[in-house]
Amino acid sequence: MPGHPAPGSALAEAVGLRVRLGGREVLAGIDLTVRAGEVLALAGPNGAGKSTLLAALAADLPATGGVVRIDGRPVGDWAARDLALRRSVLPQSAAMSFPFPVGDVVRMGRAPWAGTPLADADEQAVAAAMARAEVAGFAARPFSALSGGERARVALARVLAQQAPLLLLDEPTAALDLRHQELVLRICRERAAAGDAVVVVLHDLGLAAAYADRAAVLHEGRIAVDGPPAEAFGDELLSRVYRQPVEVFPHPRTGAPLVVPVRDDGRSAVRKGHIDLTSA
């Protein structure tokens, strides 16, 4: 049974991590530590390796080189059930072949606890997770009948019900409206405040800046920068990594970095027939 992690302890580590997919090296030597009590945002352009890194940390994708540890042990040393007690994973998309009711889908998150003393808390954990993700109102509806955003929230509730100390979330806000994007990141902060570690892939740099303790920006399979968003999100680096000129300035009230693309009125780009990125 996993114990409660000590504040600041390493729940996941990648050392010299390399992953090849389809003959291409997607991750080219990643060193990263995920600590209890923090929200770590993985950012970067499409194809930078964010989802691959998350999958490798989850032990869902084998490493070509280097090592990945969870709770101090190489991921290959954990039995599947023991691993599920220590980390929960939210993939980019949630799909099911059978029309399970929403309540049953969330209850699947409790499967690793079957036969343990904490199995008695299953229904309480499921109810709390559904309430927090705001899906209790359609507990009896078939999962297949939900909208994309509703499915995303149900999948998050399943992860919350699992109650693992390490949460690995791949683009959890992509299908959500403004309110529920904020809800998901507040939940991440709550879990970190309770002592868990959260790794979340985000395309919205504003959300990362507002809610993450650290941001690791990936570029071409490597970590270009890793640190607090106020230090990591520089306009020169982001413009280069995203191949899109941006400007970064502090929010007037909170001081959190705001990342805004540099735009003209759009008419000059239409006249040229393309967007000029050479200045990036």
Image (tube, rainbow, N blue to C red):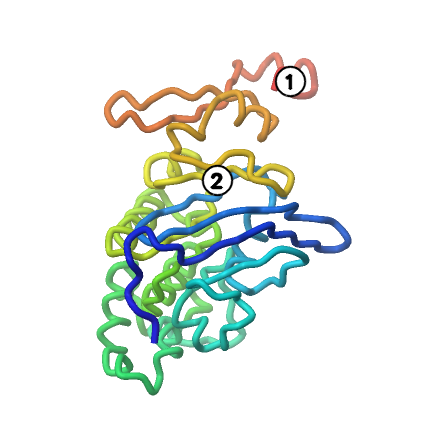
Q: 85 above or below 44?
A: below
Q: Is residue 20 left or right of residue 280?
A: right
Picture layout, residue 36 above or below residue 211: below
What secondary structure is found at the residue carrying circle 2? strand
Q: Residues within 10 Å of mark 1 (few under 14, many from 20)?
A: few
Q: Nearer the viewer, mark 1 or mark 2?
A: 2
Q: Residue at x 49, y 21 (%)?
A: 235
Question: What's the mark number on residue 270?
Answer: 1
Residue for point 47% across, 50% down: 171
Q: Amino acid at mark 1?
A: Val
The quarter in which the N terminus is drawn is bottom left
Residue that label 2 marks: 216
Position of 36 relative to 128 (above/below)? above
The percent coordinates of residue 6 (x first, y second) are: 29, 58
Q: In this view, which residue lies farthest toward the right?
A: 23
Give the image quarter of residue 134.
Answer: bottom left
